[in-house]
Amino acid sequence: MTGRNQTVISEFLLLGLPIEPEQKNLFYALFLAMYLTTILGNLPLIVLIHLDSHLHTPMYWFLSNLSFCDFCFSSVTMPKLLQNMQSQVPSITYAGCLTQMYFFLFFGDLESFLLVAMAYDRYVAICCPLHYTTIMSPKLCHALVALSWVLTTFHAMLHTLLMARLCFCADNVIPHFFCDMSALLKLSCSDTRVNELVIFITGGLILIIPFLLIIVSYARIVSSTLKVPSARGIRKAFSTCGSHLSVVSLFYGTVTALYLCPSTNNSTLKETIMAMMYTVVTPMLNPFIYSLRNRDMEGALRRVFYKKIFSCHL
């Protein structure tokens, strides 16, 4: 290995988004508003579910975890993006880059597993309503969330450790707004075949299998609904699953469009835009998708609000 290849990279430069200088302030305000919307949408949802006992059900237990995951997922990339947009040198340290990559993988994977748990919850609620309380016990719900955290921790740590063993040459410019794993592999001057093999194997386990489980759950739901066709049953199934299907479509649609398209030089802009969709837009929209026209959430908000007013007058 040459002396050049042995150069120690202490930081990377994030090129960010391809924005014209005169438009930077406009986009900065836009992204800041989107991030604040994500915070103000997800955190109150978590608090509301915690405060209202009527929402202490499996569905809302998973939803509160999903909201926490969305808040953290967006927070992994957005603060650094906003900071770099106001900086003359949009840099990130080597350790900071690996840390960002770890948490990006962790919360991205966690969202995938939580969506599977929510799909299973909807399947049991519609296909086995008489046994719902028995099957979806608090013990099982907590176990599903705990298992999701353990699996995502292992997966994120595996890729981070494999990335940490690689050497990086003089080129330290990342054509992205965060430390994307594929972008880092392109910069490495080491043999990345092991990393690519692990990505190929675990990618199927983390993305494809959960997606197939969700499809199977909703196929069973559709089949069960059609066995007893009624307008009321169809409306109930749609109202119960419509919001979850919207979230699944947003998340897996953008991830699939990003990672199944060829990684060529002229696709950098497309990759950045698609990554922006599932790292920023999806976490921002999720709380509104679940809360919009949701009578349970509206009722809980009124109860908490009136309880707060009543306690203040005592």
Image (cartoon, grey):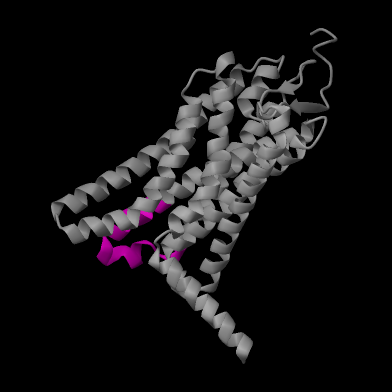
Viewer-side residue, 62 vs 92:
92
- Residue drawn at (35%, 62%) of the image: 135
Vertical relation: 161 (above or below) 28: above
Image location of residue 193, percent across then percent down: 60, 17
Question: Horizontally, is 37 left or right of 145 in the view?
Answer: right
- Residue drawn at (54%, 82%) of the image: 307
Viewer-side residue, 174 vs 110:
174
Q: Give the range drawn in magenta.
A: 118-139
**Splitting the image into 4 quarters, where does residue 311 fall?**
bottom right
Question: Horizontally, is 218 left or right of 178 in the view?
Answer: left
Viewer-side residue, 260 vs 37:
37
Question: Horizontally, is 209 left or right of 146 in the view?
Answer: left
Quadrant holding the C terminus: bottom right
Is residue 127 shown to the viewer in this render? no
List the single residue furthest toward the front: 22
Magenta stretch, main secondary structure class: helix
List the single residue furthest toward the bottom: 314
Vertical relation: 159 (above or below) 131: above
Is residue 129 shown to the viewer in this render? yes
Image location of residue 78, percent across then percent down: 67, 42
Total marks placed: 0
- Residue drawn at (50%, 17%) of the image: 262
Question: Horizontally, is 201 left or right of 24 in the view?
Answer: left
Q: Does the magenta stretch include residue 314?
A: no
Viewer-side residue, 101 vs 277:
277
- Residue drawn at (64%, 48%) of the image: 33
**Splitting the image into 4 quarters, where does residue 100 fall?**
top right
Image location of residue 8, percent across then percent down: 84, 21
Q: Is residue 135 magenta?
A: yes
Vertical relation: 192 (above or below) 149: above
Image location of residue 192, percent across then percent down: 63, 18
